[in-house]
Image: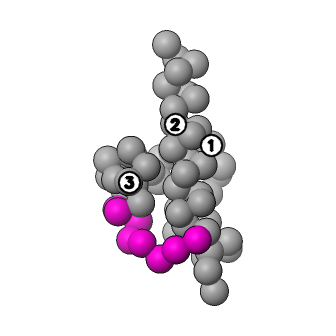
Amino acid sequence: MRFLLRATARLRVEAARRALEEGTLPMNEIARLVGFGDEQSLRRAMLASAAITPSEYRHRFGPS
């Protein structure tokens, strides 16, 4: 069961990364679209898996 939860979270983080790189949707909208529900859940998941916040990620890798 833990494996499935981790795998799901990993897929959601990857989807959030792509959305952060490609567009300018608000963080709360990205969190909702990829299945985290809210911005805090997205933030915790990205910090746990990639050691970076969504806003830092967008600043580094997002559209200029």
N-term-proximal mark, 3 vs 1? 3
Image coords of residue 43 (percent x, y): 47, 53
| Amino acid beneath label 2 | Ala
Q: Which residue is mark 3?
A: 33
Q: Secondary structure at mark 2?
A: helix
Q: Is residue 42 magenta?
A: no
According to the image, what is the colour scheme of the structure? one colour
Disc 3 residue type? Leu
**What's the mark number on residue 9?**
2
Which of 54/7 is in front?
7
Secondary structure found at label 1:
helix
Q: CA distance from mark 3 to mark 1?
A: 19 Å
User: Mark 1: few, some, or many residues within 10 Å (few <14, many ≥20)?
Assistant: few
Mark 1 sits on what residue?
49
Instruction: Point out the stretch of residues depicted in magenta.
Output: 22-29
Image mark for residue 39: none
**Nearest to viewer (mark 3 / mark 1):** 3
Question: SS class of the residue under badge 3?
Answer: helix
Query: Can the viewer see residue 53 in this picture?
Result: no
- Quarter in which the C terminus is drawn: bottom right
Instruction: Tell me which corner region of the image, top left, top right, bottom left or bottom right, holds residue 63.
Output: bottom right
| Labelled pair 3, 1 in contact (Cβ < 8 Å) | no
Q: Residue 4: where, in percent of width, then height?
A: 53, 21
The percent position of residue 20, horizontal first and vertical second, equals: 55, 66
Point 42% across, 72% down: residue: 25
